[in-house]
Image (cartoon, rainbow, N blue to C red):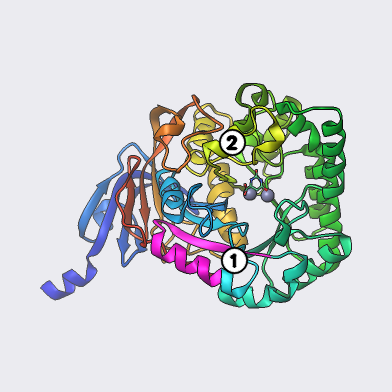
Amino acid sequence: MFEEARAEDVDLIIKGGRIFTPAGFVDGCIGVEGGKIAAIGKEAHLPKAERTIDAAEKLVLPGMVDLHVHFRDPGSPEREDFCTGTSAAAAGGVTTIMDMPNTIPPTVSGEAFREKRTTGEARAVVDFAICGGVGVKSIGNVLEIAREGATAFKTFMTSRFEELFSGNDATLLTILREVSQSALPCFIHAEDQAITAAELHKLKRAGRLDPMAHTESRPPIAEAHGALRALSLANEAGARLHICHTSTPEAMEYASWSKNRHQPVTVETCPQYLLLTHDLMAKRGPYAKVDPPLRSESSRRKMWDMFVQGQIDTLGSDHAPYAVKEKDMGWSDIFEAPSGSPGVETTLPLMLDCVSRGLLSIERLVQAFSQAPARMTRLFPLKGSLQIGADADIVIVDMKKERTIRGDSLHSKQKYSLFEGWTCKGWPVLTVLRGMVVADDGEIVMKPGYGKFLRPC
Ligand code: DOR
Ligand code: ZN
Ligand code: ZN
């Protein structure tokens, strides 16, 4: 009798919260056994547990899935590494990340891919997927990288990262054909190289080195035309295209047109394109420099509406830290500073604040920042959902908690934020990964190396 009862016990029960299930919110408990969700229901119907977490008056959401981070590891540990990057993720309610390929070395070969996997396995605090990289010279490596367990590929239409540059239309078409053979989605940085190079040249000749020159060097048409080219070629190649960090309604129009023709296309945007405008360039200079650049208020507003309406599929942070001394190079000449800013820790609180203000539904948020990213990388239903059999990746959120974003209290190695001074209402207070607490009220309580490498299911 005693033995039988023991067999029914679970490792952990999270009780008292409002649980976000595929069928909607349920007031009840989650039972976790062996790192997986074993039961969801009323407390009276649940088995006994060794440990209990009280989530009274809190929301219990699936862990967030951020498919767009640059953790700089291996190669640039002074900027970020897998430990600090995944710590920032955990503190921000993100339990799964996918790391972008522009590390040193870039993940354009099986060998570089394996090196990053080993790096992550030694240092990650949350689970991680790795994005393979492909450029003109590495097309022949795509299938090997896919076999290593890549969740997606990324290529860049701008030449900033030489080994990841997709080249001209003919080479991009070849890349897309090869990636479609792997059945993985092709992520794309869709800013047109010819247009951005020409604009940059004009501005430099005119002696423009001020922060707004960065914005002007990458006009909306560069993104819209890049997206149009990529969509057309992906259609021909039969590739699944995912347009990263979409910042303009102009690019969205082309993506929506392709979707209406049932082309397999998904679109990502980031909090900075939903909440900030290029006015920030004047105030923050190089610290507001990101690619694509921050846009006008009218663009931002249209992007917000499309996000709320579900035309934008996923939210990613584009967490891209640089050292302060690299950023500071841009004060006298904006083109001397690298583009990018940390963001993985603030994405969820910024969006929860929008929920608090009645601008966004919690359902849309979870869909865009957990379910949809997990689905498109075939990590669903292990990730991205609170259902029986899924990994017990859970973020407990306190919608009453108010806190102001301060770069120096975040976990990234870089102590600045695009959202410095923003007060958010709604914060993750406990992050659970495969049944274990990894972050408790902003404090990392799990050892590096707990995070597991993820390949598509
Ligand atoms: O702002 C950006 N930063 N855009 C990119 O495309 C790359 C990223 C980085 O890795 O720094
Ligand atoms: Zn990019
Ligand atoms: Zn990026």
Give the CA distance from mark 1 to mark 2.
Answer: 31 Å
**x, y percent for residue 28:** 33, 48
**x, y percent for residue 376:** 62, 60
Q: Residue at x 62, y 21 (%)?
A: 283
Q: Is residue 119 magenta?
A: yes
Indicate the quadrant containing the N terminus: top left, top right, bottom left or bottom right: bottom left
What element does badge 2 sit on? helix
Q: Name the image quarter holding residue 12.
A: bottom left
Q: Residue at x 54, y 37 (%)?
A: 325
Left or right? Give the position of 243 relative to 227: left
Which residue, given by chain and number where applicable, does mark 1 sit on?
A: 151
**Amino acid type shown at disc 1:** Thr
First in residue order: circle 1 vs circle 2 = 1
Q: Residue at x 23, y 61 (%)?
A: 47
- Label of residue 327 in the image: 2
Give the residues drawn in magenta, as a range.
113-133
**x, y percent for residue 191:** 78, 47
Q: Is residue 186 magenta?
A: no
Mark 2 Cα shell of 10 Å, populated few (<14), some (14-19), many (≥20): many
What element does badge 1 sit on? loop
Q: Residue at x 75, y 61 (%)?
A: 264
Labelled pair 1, 2 in contact (Cβ < 8 Å): no
